[in-house]
Image (cartoon, helix red, strand yellow):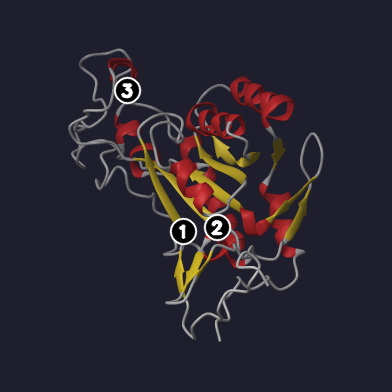
């Protein structure tokens, strides 16, 4: 047998794992295996527009965007600027039911939140201008509102924290962003690819701003995109959301809702165990 076809020495009893289980090298003192052990597919079929969708739950993530105090709390940055936060709060109970069901079935939840630098060093003039609504006297990114809860949307501040009513799990992923699109100048794409995630379901606020910007970039990068319509909202006029839904159906992916997703999850059999390595 040639050297190129000779089997590798058997691994040691306790092979070391380098990476996520489905995207890992396995090493022992004798050899390193570069063979990825992909998890068994877990098909999830759900109603959607313009066509029903079947995705692999093991390679999918529920991406929850910007459900944070500064946007959703009555004393947050938005509310203190006089913005009606009714729409910002509307997805809270929907996501509060959907996220645990998604996790229980074996899906990953990813929280994608604003979390800017305190010194604003990477925010350009256009972002700073729009953050103040064009009014130099208004409270902008990183500044303190009259009812002081700390600097707005600075990573680690109260305002950047998750809104009451939603609960993150230690196994969830958390990514901070500093633009409308979570893919711009962030680690989001790298994290998703390292985790083997190819399908993204979007929830959160605002439908026409950070949700749509991130979904559109995801589609450009080759991810499968589903917008969970009633798990998203925006204070913009209704016709704006209608336009986003139209564009998602037409160009970027699929439109579904929490009832369809919950029904699909309820129809699953016992979740497939995550892969393990038998190195004996």
Of badges 3 and 1, nearer the viewer stands 1
Q: Residue at x 43, y 34 (%)?
A: 85
Residue identified by numbered label 2? 108
The image position of residue 279, as x and y in percent, is 55, 81
Count of picture labels: 3
What numbered label is drawn on residue 172?
1
User: Residue 158: percent from the left, percent from the top?
Assistant: 26, 47
The location of residue 273, given as percent across then percent down, is 64, 73
Residue lying furthest right:
51
| Quadrant containing the C terminus in the rendered view | bottom right
Q: Is residue 226 visible?
A: no
Per the image, the residue denoted by label 3 is 131
Looking at the image, is mark 2 or mark 3 earlier in the sequence? 2
Task: Tell me what residue is drawn at x 34 percent, y 18 percent.
Answer: 130
What residue appears at the point 66 percent right and 57 percent down from the top-left corner? 57
Q: Secondary structure at mark 2?
A: strand
Q: Residues within 10 Å of mark 3 (few under 14, many from 20)?
A: some
Is disc 1 placed on a helix, strand or loop? loop
User: What is the distance, in whole Å, between disc 1 and disc 2 at their CAs?
Assistant: 6 Å
Cα separation between marks 2 and 3:
31 Å
- Residue 241 in view, yes or no: yes
Left or right placement of residue 182 versus residue 125 in this view: right
- 9 left or right of 263 in image: left
- In the foreground, 139 or 256: 256
Q: Position of residue 40 (x, y in %)?
A: 70, 66
């Amino acid at each position: 047998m040639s050297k190129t076809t000779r089997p590798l020495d058997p691994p040691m009893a306790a092979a070391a794992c380098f990476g996520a289980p489905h995207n890992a090298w396995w090493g022992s003192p004798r050899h390193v295996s570069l063979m990825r052990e992909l998890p068994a597919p877990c098909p999830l079929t759900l109603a959607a527009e313009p066509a029903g969708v079947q995705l692999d739950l093991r390679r999918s993530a529920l991406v929850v965007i910007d459900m944070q105090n500064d946007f959703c709390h009555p004393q947050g940055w938005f509310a203190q600027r006089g913005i009606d936060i009714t729409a910002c709060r509307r997805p809270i109970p929907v996501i509060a039911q959907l996220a645990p069901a998604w996790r229980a079935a074996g899906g990953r939840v990813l929280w994608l939140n604003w979390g800017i630098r305190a010194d604003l060093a990477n925010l350009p003039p256009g972002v700073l201008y729009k953050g103040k609504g064009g009014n130099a006297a208004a409270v902008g990114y990183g500044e303190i509102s009259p009812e002081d809860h700390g600097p707005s949307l600075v990573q680690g501040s109260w305002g950047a924290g998750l809104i009451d009513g939603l609960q993150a799990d230690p196994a969830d992923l958390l990514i901070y962003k500093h633009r409308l699109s979570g893919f711009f100048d962030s680690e989001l794409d790298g994290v998703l690819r390292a985790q083997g995630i190819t399908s993204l379901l979007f929830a959160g606020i605002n439908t026409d701003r950070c949700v749509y910007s991130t979904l559109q970039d995801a589609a450009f990068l080759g991810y499968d995109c589903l917008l969970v319509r009633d798990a998203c909202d925006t204070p913009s006029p209704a016709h704006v959301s209608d336009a986003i839904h139209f564009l998602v159906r037409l160009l970027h992916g699929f439109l579904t809702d929490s009832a369809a997703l919950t029904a699909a999850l309820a129809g699953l059999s016992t979740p497939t165990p995550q892969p393990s390595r038998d190195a004996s």
